[in-house]
Amino acid sequence: MNRCAPSLPFPPPLSCKRTRSLPSSIYSMGPLKGSFWNCILVGIVVVTWVYRPCLVRGFSSSASSQDNPYGNYARLSRRVPVEQQWLLLEEQLVPPTNPPLVIDSSSDGWTEQLLDPTLPTLARERNGWCLYSTRLWLALEVKCIPYQTILVEYHQDTYDGSYDQDAYHRLPSFLHEQQLPLLSLPPNPTEWLSGGTEDSSWELLQKIEDAFPDCRPLIPPDNNNTADSSMQDAAAKAYQTALPTGARSSPRAGWLFSKVEGYRLDALPRESFERFLDIAEETIRGPFFAGPSLSLADIVWAPLLERYHVQLPSLHRDLFLLLGSTNESQSRRWPKVQRWYQAMMTVPAYACRVKGDAVSWHKVLSREPWWPSPDLWHPRDTVGPKGELYLTTEECSSQLDQQQQQQQQSTTLWKAYSEARHHMSPKGPAGQAALLILQNRAAILEDAKRWMEEEGYGDEQLKNNDLNAGLCAIVTRLSNMDNAGGGDATLSQFEFEEESTTAPIMIILLQYLDSRVCVPRDMGALSAAALRRLNATFVGRKSQN
């Protein structure tokens, strides 16, 4: 994306005016009156008096800028018009390199002619729910291949199997008769290959590897004592053996619920999930499935194991996969799976972009259309009664997200991920969250206003200028977090009181963003974690005041 604003000089504080009244003593200088030195002295005094706020602010900010290079901006921003603040943020945050092409298939005015025929193109389900879409996405990201994306809304994923016919016909023609995900590879950009089954998904992963063998190989070398391609193939086949039987098809909530009529809101039996995890435990040959390094086998297993980590303890009491949970004896049953999760968090492309977070995976289970609202009537012979989730969203976040570990690793992971992707924020995951909000601020403000109306906020909080200023303040805070020691969002009491006029609307907008953001649809897990930490900080400050 090109920079949206020209270079701007940093504006002086509006308090630096030449119309301040001067002390009367300046005009009575005794013996120096009328002399050359009188003129010099009067000039020094006048300049010092007029610009004393600027001098004080300059000296104090120079000391703090060593710790926070943007600390001066945080103070001056309240004296600058909001639109000018946005221009300054664009200058600071928007990278000079355009991002790869991403097309929303539901938008008007796009054609296949927009696609670069020399690059791979992935047409995938937009939210990051589809297992097969996530596999291809993760493979392209890990190999760091430049590629184009077509985001498609999956309209067939409802609890009763229905879908929106009108939305279906708005899809591009080449998507009508084929199953997501679809991949085109040069030199045949018009040939769309479907990866919507286990076999076809595995074939497309191998095609990506064959087309780009020199980009971060994902097939282990043969004749290696610890890992080879035969181990990889065996691990991929073991996945198909491990999949629970009796599950209904779903891109959004795959391999979770019964396909039996009348019981389609019932989770599969606990034994089905335990068998899946037992086979995974037996298959893993090192930190990764095929040995010491990431391979295509990990790409196959990762999407489902990731969401099982959050969703299984929500569907079956104490079915925790990781140590440190409330049920240590249960989680100790799969120590290799535990180490595999830890190893995957060292893969920059996975941790920074493709991985979801606990809050988002929990919402999949608790929101329409998969688990309809309890006040809606559904005949027993159609879907069955809605069950109970054993963990709340807050419990999922606190017990399963391991945010402290993410925060400690985030700087190193982000540096490794962004150094070859010049369209990403070099500042860090919080800076990337700031960049994404900045680039989409018009749509965010419009949606935030609708959300606030639904939540019952009054006209006083819905003023457009206040919302714009509040969102700008959030972006400013996020842009500074990566510079403050690993993403520390802590505000001093003085800072919070100093922002008292902006803080109330910031808190409302942070709560909106926290509730609306979907990972990995909107941003990566590390960026979302920074946004959620900022929300928790301001909400905590509000409760203390």
Image (spheres, helix red, strand yellow):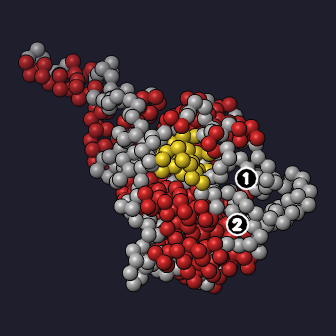
Placement of the N terminus among the 4 image quadrants: top left
Question: Can residue 190 be seen in the rendering of this structure?
Answer: yes
Q: What secondary structure is marked by label 1?
A: loop
Residue drawn 64% across and 68% down?
308
Question: Can residue 500 be seen in the rendering of this structure?
Answer: no
* Residue 169 quadrant: top right
Residue drawn 58% across and 61% down?
201
Residue drawn 49% across and 55% down?
353
Observer-nearest of 34 and 452: 452
Q: Residue 246: x percent and y percent?
A: 77, 70
* Residue 391 quadrant: bottom right
Give the left or right position of residue 73, taking residue 444 as reference. Answer: left
Label annotation for residue 473 = none
Q: Residue 395: x percent and y percent?
A: 65, 65
Mark 1: amino acid: Asp
Label annotation for residue 255 = 2
When the figure is inspected, residue 325 is found, relative to residue 92, above or below; the finding is below
How far is disc 2 from disc 1 in space, using C-alphas?
A: 13 Å
**Crowd band around label 2 with a 10 angstrom C-alpha radius: few (<14), some (14–19), many (20+):** many
Q: What secondary structure is marked by label 2?
A: loop
- Single out the residue that lies furthest toward the left: 36
Mark 2: amino acid: Trp
**N-terminal label among 2 and 1:** 1
The residue indicated by pointer 1 is 157
Q: Residue 365: x percent and y percent?
A: 72, 59
Q: Residue 479: x percent and y percent?
A: 42, 46
